């Protein structure tokens, strides 16, 4: 019988979520520094980098990466 290792899943999920969130925040900050070519440039979607929509992207990445890796780690069990 297979038992879930919830503690391991939560730790791995939290770490993976943080890594994913930092990567997405870094991409938002990087995209906000691009030069503006037109009035509808992608740069304006991320500027300023602390904009609320950027934080929603970061939270989404945290949840996506955290759940994905956390569930996989919990299902793997003790090895």
Image (cartoon, rainbow, N blue to C red):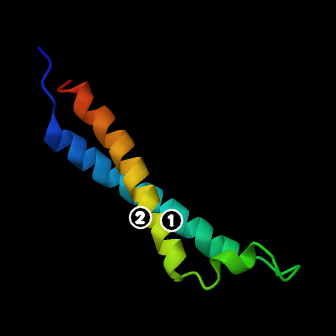
Direction top: furthest residue: 1
Q: Which residue is mark 1?
A: 57
Residue drawn at point x = 47 percent, y = 69 percent: 56
Residue 71 found in image quarter: top left
| 50 lies above or below 5 | below
Q: Left or right: where does residue 61 sit relative to residue 36?
A: left
Instruction: Point out the image quarter for the C terminus.
Output: top left
Classify the position of the N terminus by image quarter: top left
How far is mark 2 from mark 1, CA to CA? 6 Å
Above or below, 8 relative to 43: above
- Rendered residue at 41%/49% (across/down): 65
Most foreground residue, 7 or 37: 37
Most foreground residue, 79 or 54: 54
Place of residue 16 in the rendered image (x, y in percent of width and height, measured from the top left)? 37, 50
User: SS for tag 2?
Assistant: helix
Q: Is residue 33 visible?
A: no
Asked if one can make out residue 71 in the rendered structure from this viewpoint, the answer is yes
**Residue 19 image point, x, y percent:** 43, 56
Bin the neighbour count of mark 2 within 10 Å (Cα to Cα): few under 14, some 14-19, many 20 and up.
some
| Number of numbered discs on residues | 2
- Report which quarter residue 5 is drawn in: top left
Q: Residues within 10 Å of mark 1 (few under 14, many from 20)?
A: some
Q: Is residue 4 left or right of residue 72?
A: left
Residue 6: x %, y % from top left: 16, 39
Q: Residue furthest right?
A: 37
Vertically, is 72 above or below 41?
A: above
Which residue is under mark 2?
Answer: 59
Q: Do residues under tags 2 and 1 come within 8 Å of each other at their CB atoms?
A: yes
Question: Helix, strand, or loop for circle 1?
Answer: helix
For the point 32% across and 33% down, the residue is 72
């Amino acid at each position: 019988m297979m038992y879930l290792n919830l503690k391991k899943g939560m730790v791995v999920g939290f770490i993976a979520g943080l890594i994913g969130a930092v990567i997405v925040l870094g991409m938002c900050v990087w995209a906000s520094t691009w030069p503006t070519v037109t009035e509808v440039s992608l740069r304006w979607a991320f500027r300023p980098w602390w904009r609320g929509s950027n934080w929603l992207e970061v939270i989404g990445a945290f949840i996506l990466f955290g759940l994905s890796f956390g569930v996989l780690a919990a299902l793997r069990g003790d090895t």
